[in-house]
Image: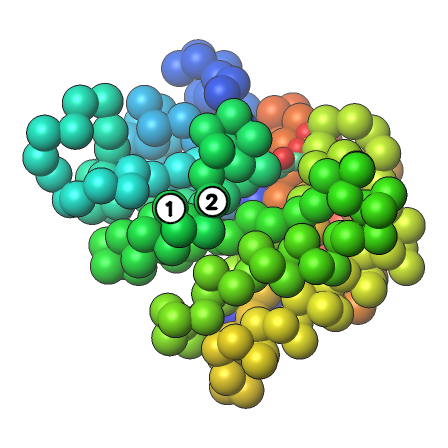
Amino acid sequence: MWQQKWIIGNWKMNGSQSANRQLLQALLKPVDVAAAHVYCGVAVPNVYLAGVNEFTRDTSLAVGAQDVSRFAANGAFTGEVSAQMLADVGAQFVLIGHSERRQYFHEDNQELLIKLQNSMAAGLLPVLCVGETLAEREQGQEQVVVSAQLDVLASLGMREVVVAYEPVWAIGTGKVPSVTQIAAMHQLIYQQILSLCGEDVKIRVLYGGSVNAGNAAEILAVPHVDGALVGGASLQADSFAAIIQAAYAPA
Ligand SMILES: O=C(CO)COP(=O)(O)O
């Protein structure tokens, strides 16, 4: 899986039992056909994790969560879901620090460090999301911002690191950075991870933000782009399948 391109769908707060079944049913074949070349996954709302895991058992589609509690494995934390619980119902990976969580829930490096530690302790693979806002890019601060977000990795001793670079201004907007902008940021992220985690760390850096069937091949061909984290286009089987195909048969 470390040699493959990764295509991860982030369903965000979308879905229903029947819609999920329909979507997954339509994805099983394209995911299976791509399995030798592409690691495919979906990050689903917690309430659907067990059902999606059951539905995709014995398939190549990995299932993950979109967030994890910063609190303990269990205890008096009403409404929280721990990393152990996510793993127990079949999550293999978890998104950490998505920009929507940073924006709406004010998650910072201190909190994200604990979420990373909790995920690792439970055997979940964390996917750390980083990215600058439009204002930060307009001020030329994007590298400073993303570097500071990556600093959370410094003390973890991780041997395998998955990061998703998602510029906030590209999420759900249809605006995509230029190939040159993506290449520059992904190279910076690689360098930063190597200096924080050591030369023998395994790295995957995914791009996210308005990836669709039409632009996936071009984005996935950029150096140091190891895959994509897909929001809106992962909710339609046709477009998600086309993105998966673009990951191993670039047009
Ligand atoms: O936030 C994203 C994935 O985590 C990207 O969302 P969109 O693909 O809808 O822009």
Point out residue 240 in the picture as x, y percentages from the top left corner: 66, 35
Query: In the image, is 120 to the left or to the right of 242?
Result: left
Res. 111 mark: 1
Extreme residue in the bottom direction: 199
Residue type indicated by callout 1: Glu
Residue 105 in sight from this viewpoint? yes
Q: State the residue position of label 2.
A: 108
The color scheme shown is rainbow
Q: Reply above or below: 192 against 174.
A: below
- Residue 233: % across, % down: 69, 30
Element on which disc 1 rests: helix
Image location of residue 187, percent across then percent down = 74, 69
Quarter of the image for residue 124 reads bottom left
Task: Note whether 78 is above or below 121 in the view shown.
Answer: above
Kindly tell me whether mark 1's CB lies below 8 Å from ligand 1.
Answer: no
Q: Position of residue 65 (x, y in %)?
A: 40, 38
